Image (cartoon, rainbow, N blue to C red):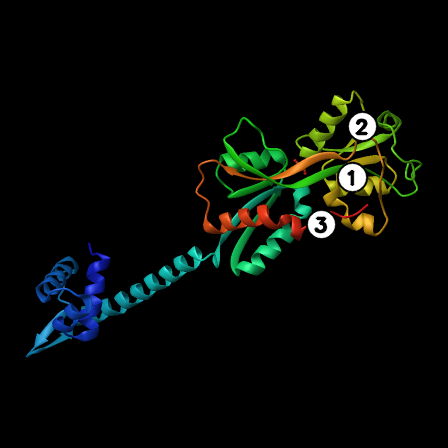
Amino acid sequence: MNITFRQLQIFDAVARNLSFTRASEELHLTQPAVSMQIKQLEQSVGLPLFEQLGKKIFLTEAGQEFSRYASAIGSQLDELEQVVDEMKGLQRGRLTIAVASTANYFVPRLLATFCQRHGDVTVSLDVTNREQLLKGLVENRTDLVIMGQPPEDMDLVAERFLENPLVVIAPPDHLLAKEKNIPLHRLLEETFLVREQGSGTRSAVERFFSANQIALSTQMEMSSNEAIKQGVEAGLGLGIVSMHTLEMELALKRLVILDVEKLPIMRNWYIVHRSGKRLSLVAQGFQKFVQEESRQVLKLPSA
Ligand code: PGA
């Protein structure tokens, strides 16, 4: 059956009015145009949809079935139009976002404020490592990524929006806990718990110490910030993590930040998408919100 939406609309008007004249007025068409469309529709269907008795027209049995479906399709289309209108107004839509594991300490707060304002936004949040983040961008599986310094050899659009200071953490009873301006080389005497290969924090720490010609003792590798903080609390060694991860431990005085010369290591957060990607209105809205308001919404914990 080869029929068009337009034919269905015309059929629906004739069926509701049970008159070719009134249908053509409603549709701003001539009556012969309406009759022609109905004739073609009946030919495609292979059955008459209307019958004429005297001066009146009636729906045939096939016409009644057709009428039911035509009005259901009409209301589905109206609904679709509403959904699209709402999406244009940003009230409804889907946001697919992937973030580096350290960013997971603040991104849910940004999402909460954004979603409160924009009602019916559905969020899919993936927390993963740098390698997977970049893969997601290449394969176009994500709208936006929040990560540390993005690579320069990929075709990306990246906007910096927030500082990410990395600090040395210790248990409160550590020998160095009360020292001021601890020399960098003093850290050579300590054992460090470090993040896994592929972590942005890990590579920033490595770059910083190699630039300062210090080879830290880093036998212990852990694949999450939580594991590092727990290990440091338990006395396994010192750690270097983002300030964003420390809100609870500092408030509860479970960990302290050591005052080490040249630290914190200053890193930044970027909101990134593939260049040329057509961002949805919701994604554009979130990107703008992050750039303009993340500093007000997020406060770094104080040492
Ligand atoms: P992470 O942090 O990969 O160490 O979790 C992201 C970054 O700082 O790049």
Q: How far apart are marks 1 and 3 (CA)?
A: 22 Å
Q: Mark 3 points at which residue?
A: 299
Q: Which secondary structure, mark 2?
A: strand
Circles 1 and 3: CB distance less than 8 Å? no
Q: Which amino acid does label 2 sit on?
A: Gln
Does label 1 point to a residue whose CB lies under 8 Å from ligand 1?
Answer: no
Q: Pointer 3: residues within 10 angstroms few (<14), some, or many (20+)? A: few
Q: Pointer 2: residues within 10 angstroms few (<14), some, or many (20+)? A: few
Q: Quadrant of the C terminus?
A: top right
Q: What residue type is labelled 3?
A: Lys
The quadrant of the picture showing ligand 1 is top right
In percent of width and height, residue 145 lies at 57, 41
Q: Mark 2 points at which residue?
A: 219
In percent of width and height, residue 47 lies at 14, 64
203 to the left or right of 168: left
Q: What is the total number of numbered labels drawn onto the structure image? A: 3
Q: Mark 1 points at which residue?
A: 228
Residue 45 in which image quadrant: bottom left
Q: What residue type is labelled 1?
A: Ile
In percent of width and height, residue 30 lies at 11, 65
Q: Which secondary structure, mark 1?
A: helix
In percent of width and height, residue 165 lies at 73, 38
Circles 1 and 2: CB distance less than 8 Å? no
Q: How far apart are marks 1 and 2 (CA)?
A: 13 Å
Residue drawn at 16 percent across, 70 percent down: 25
Depth check, mark 3 against mark 2: the one in front is: 3
